[in-house]
Amino acid sequence: MTTSSLPHPLPRASADEAPKTSQQRQLAAIPQARRWHWNWKQVWFQLHWFIGITAGTVLVIIGLSGATLAFKEELLDVMNPGVRHVPVETRAPLAPGQLSNIAATEHGQRVASVTMYAEAGAAPRLFFAPKNGQRRGESIYVHPYTGATQPALMGAGFFEWTESLHRWLLLPRDPGRQVAGALALCLLGLAFSGLYLRWPRRPLDWRTWLTFDPALKGRSFLWNLHAVAGTWCLVVYVALTLTGLYWSYDVVRDNIDAWAGKPPRTAQAPAKKGASKEKKEAPAVDISLAWSSFQQHAPGWTLASVRLPVRPGDAVQFTWLASDAPHERARSRMSILPADGTVTENEPYSQQALGARLVNIIYPLHMGTYFGLPGRIIVTVASLGLPLFAITGWMLYLGRRKAKRAVQAQRALLGAGAPGKTNTGLPTLLAYASQSGQAERLALESAHALQQAGVAVDVQSLDRFDPAQLRQYERALIVASTFGEGEAPDGTRRFARLLQASSGMPLASLEFGMLALGDRHYSAFCGFGHVLAQQLQTLGATPLFPLIEVDKHDPAALADWSKALARCSGSAIDAIGVQEEASYAEWRLARRVLLNPGSLGGELHEITLTGPAGATWEAGALAEIIGRNADGSDGDAHHAQHAPRSYSLASLPSDGELQLLVRQERHAGDENQGHGICSGWLTRFAPLGASIRLRLQANPAFAPALVDVPCIYIGNGSGLAGLRAHLRARQRAGLARNWLLFGERQQAFDSVCGEELQGWLDAGHLARLDRVFSRDGDEVGKRQYVQDRLRASAGELRDWLAQGAIVYVCGSLQGMAAGIDAVLQEVLGQEDLDALLAAGRYRRDVY
C-alpha cells in the first residue's frame, strides 16, 4: 500500500499524552455511563495480577505439596517393599479378633479398630486407642498370616510433614487451616477473574479456549501459555478450592454437615480423664461370630474397618467398601452383636441420605480419586501447574514494569519541552497537527533546538488544543501536516472546526510561523497549512515569515525552516530533519508472490524482504522505499534521486522477515514500461536478491492496541497489509475481540490472504469477519462496498464503540475511507466522531 509519509501521518493520541496507556486515552471519549464496563475489567485485572504475585507465590507451596500427596500410597509402597503387602500363603489369614489380641498382648495397648483388606497378602492396619492428650492413637501394620508387627513405614514422617504443610502451612492447626482457606479463596478468585479477563466474543468455539500456539514468542508466548493452561486447569482449581474450604473453616463444615443430617461435632462430648484407662482395662470381646456374620452379609467387600466394642454387649461397628462402590468414601455401615452375630443395623451406601452421600464425595473430588486414576493424574498435573502460573505471571508482571520504566525514561528524555506542559505563561507555543507522526517529530526536534538556544517553549498538539488558548501566547510556531485533499489530520478536525467558527476572536497580539507538510502528488499540496495560516491572519495574527512548504523530506525547505527558527531565537539553529535522510538501510528481495491472478484490478504482490539483524518495528509502521528504474538505474533524466514511497508493513519482527502488499501501478507512456517507479521495481523488475533501499518509519497514530479492548479493522485492497500486521500482533497477545471488514472486487480472484483470515475466524481470533466483493453484485447500482456493510451493521458498531472499541481504517482515501468516515458521522454524529478522533480511537492509514 502506498501512502505519503509526510502529509499522511495517522490518527493517534498526541505526543502530550504519549505516556498514557491506550485505555486512559479511550476513557476521555467515552460517556460516564459507558465507562463502567471498562473500569470493572480494569479492577479485575488489577486484582488478578496483585493476588497472583502475592498469594500466588504461596499457592505454589500448596500445589507442590498436593501433587506430592496425590500418589502417597504408591510412593510408600515403592519405598517399603514387603511391608504393606506380603507374599500370599495357602493358609487363611487371621481374623480381626485374632490380630487385635496378638497386638494388644505385644504392645500392651487396647486396639480400637482394625482395617482389613480383601486383597490376598494385604497387611491389615490396627489403630490403638488414643492416650491421654492425643487426638488419635498410633497405628501399625501387621502380618496377615502371623499377626506379627510389620516394620515402620520409611518416609511416613515425610508425608505427614507434607500433609501438615499442605493443610495448614506448618502453622498451628486452627490458624493454619484458616490461612490455607484464605489462599484457596485467592485461587478461586484467580480462576474466575482469569476466566472473565480472557472471555472471547465467541465463547462456544472450543478452539478459542483450549488451543495453544507454540510458535509464539516473548510476551505473547507467556500470555498464551498462562491463559490457555489456566483454562485447562480452571475446573480442577474450582473443585479443589471449594472442597478445600470444607476443612478450612468450621462454619462451612458445620453448615454442610447440618444440611447433610450429620450430628454436630460440638455435640460429641470430650473424653473424660481416666476414660482411656477404663477402656484399656476392659476385657477383650470375642468378635469372631460378628466377623463371620459380616462376611455373609457383605459379599464383594474390598475394605472393612472394624471398630471393636469397648464393653461387653456393645455391637461391633463395620464400615466397609463394596467392589462396585463409585468412590473410596462410598462406604456402607453395619452393626453386629458379637455374642450371636445378629445384625442390628445394615445401611448400604446406596440407601443413605442424599446429603450424606454428597458430603462423602468431597474428599474424592479433592484428591481426584472420584474419577479413578485419570482423575488423580489430572489433579496432580493441575497442582504442578501452579508454579507455572506463578512463574509466567511474574514474568508478565516484570515485563509490564520494564515497559513502564521505558516509557518513563522516554518521557524524561523530552526534558522541559516534553508534551503535556501546562505552563501557559511560556512566550512561544510550538504546536503541531500530525497524522502519522512526522509533524510531531519535526515539532519536537524544533522545540529542542529552540531550548538549546535559550528560548522557552510550550509544545502542544492541536488535537486537544482549544483555539481560545492562542490568546495566551505572544508567538506560535506551527508544524501542520495535510491529510488527503487539503484536509486537517484526523485528530485536528475539532480544532480546525472550532477555529473556523471563531470569527470574533481577536488574535492581533499573536505572531505565528507555519511549516506546512505535504505531497505534490496531491492537488491540494500543503492545503491544511495554507487554510490554517489564512484563518489565523483573518483573526488578526501576524506571520513571522512566509509559509514554508515541505514536499516529503525536502532538505531545502527544512533548511529554510531552520533559518527561520534561528531568526526567531537570535541564535544559530542546527539543521532540522537532517537525520531523516541518513537512516536508509540495504534490504534484500527474498521473494514475491502474486496474490490475485486473473483479477480485474492491478496485480497485488506479497513482497518479502530480509534486512539488517535486529531490525524492529511495531504493527502499523511504514517502510519508506526508494525505487529504481526498470533497468536498475537510480534517478530520473535530471539525475535526481527518485522520491521515496511508503508502504504499510504486513508482518512483525517475530515473523523473521518484512512483508509488504504492493499494488502494481500502471500508467500510459514508455517510462519504466508503463509501471510506477517504486511498485514496478518491487513487483516486476527487481531480481530476487536485489538490494532495496528502505527506511523503517514509525507510525504512532496507527499504533496497535495490545490491551484487552475491542478493535474494528476496516480496509480494502492493499490496505489489508497494515491490518494484517495489527491482527497478527493481537493474536500473539491473545486478544480476540477483533472485527475485520475487508473489501475487494471478486471473491474468485481477490480473496487476498483468505486462508489466513479464515483460520483466524475458525480459531476465534476474529470475533467477526466481513469480506465484501463489490463486483460480485448482479447490477452496478446494487454493488456493495465495505462502507455499505458497516452501515448495515450500525447496531453492532454502536455496541462495539460503547465497549471502548478502536476503529482502524487502512486503504484508499477516495471511496472506501471517505465512505467509512461518512458512515461513522451518520451513526455517531459530528460531536461524538470528533471525540472518537481526539481520544485516538479512530485511526487511519489511507492513501
Image (cartoon, rainbow, N blue to C red):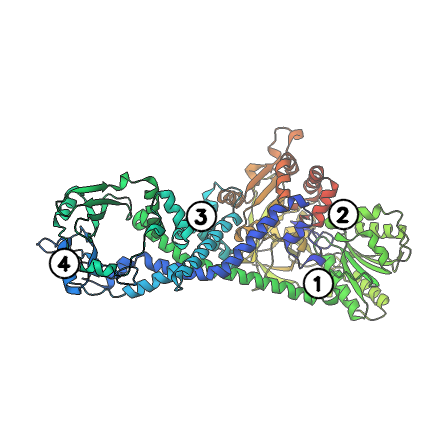
Q: Quadrant of residue 645?
A: bottom right
- The residues tagged by marks 4 and 3 sit, at their Cα atoms, a distance apart of 58 Å
What label sits on residue 493 in the rendered view? 2
Task: Name the kind of residue labelled 1 in the image.
Answer: Glu
For mark 3, what is the residue?
210
Circle 2: element type = helix
**Depth check, front residue: 366 or 552:** 366
Secondary structure beneath dot 1 equals helix
Circle 4 Cα neighbour tier, 10 Å, few/some/many (<14 / 14–19 / ≥20): some
Task: Tell which circle, 3 or 2, labels the residue nearer the N-terminal end.
Answer: 3
Q: What's the residue at 61%, 31% (across, down)?
A: 777
Q: Are marks 4 and 1 in contact (CB under 8 Å)?
A: no
Disc nearer the start of the sequence (4/2):
4
- Alpha-carbon span between mark 1 and mark 3: 46 Å
**Dot 4 or dot 1, earlier in sequence:** 4
Q: Badge 4 is on which residue?
A: 101
